[in-house]
Amino acid sequence: MSTEILSASQIKSAIAELDGWTENSEGALAKSFKFKDFSQSFAFMTRVALLAEKANHHPDWSNSYNRVEIALVNHEKGGITQKDVDLAKAIDAL
């Protein structure tokens, strides 16, 4: 899994293959998830945490009741990498 920064065209192509992800103003892959209630949103976050730990790549995220906001970026590299795209795909597969 490459940790090199993706080019603008690579990011655009990756986003086209992802469901509902965008590049936010901070240059991260971002998506908002909405659930029935807090319990469902927290269960989702738990599953994402397990994926992230396995990938050794941890999201920036927040939770407010039934909403989970996720942003994926490689802070060390300073941009979006294939690792971010792969984690976004794994999150969507949940």
Image (cartoon, rainbow, N blue to C red):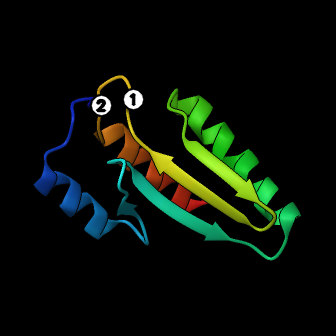
Is residue 16 shown above or below 4?
A: below
The amino acid at mark 2 is Gly
Asked whether, in this view, residue 75 is left or right of residue 78, the answer is right
- Binning the other alpha carbons within 10 Å of mark 2 as few (below 14), some (14 to 19) or many (20 upward) gives few
- Residue marked by disc 1: 75
Question: Which of the 4 quarters of the picture holds residue 69?
Answer: bottom right
SS category of the residue bearing label 1: loop
Question: Which of the 4 quarters of the picture holds residue 5?
Answer: top left
Is residue 43 shown above or below 56?
A: below
Asked whether, in this view, residue 46 is left or right of residue 57, the answer is right
Question: Residue 10: x percent and y percent?
Answer: 16, 53
**Where residue 4 is drawn, which disc sits there?**
none
**Where residue 78 is drawn, which disc sits there?**
2
Q: Residue furthest front?
A: 25
CA separation in Å, label 1 and label 2? 5 Å
**Residue drawn at the location 85% of the way across and 64% of the way down:** 38
Question: Residue 23: x percent and y percent?
Answer: 33, 58
Viewer-proximal residue, 54 or 69?
A: 69
SS category of the residue bearing label 2: loop
Asked whether, in this view, residue 39 is left or right of residue 83, the answer is right
Question: Residue 14: x percent and y percent?
Answer: 26, 58
Question: Residue 2: x percent and y percent?
Answer: 26, 31
**Residue drawn at the location 21% of the way across and 30% of the way down:** 4
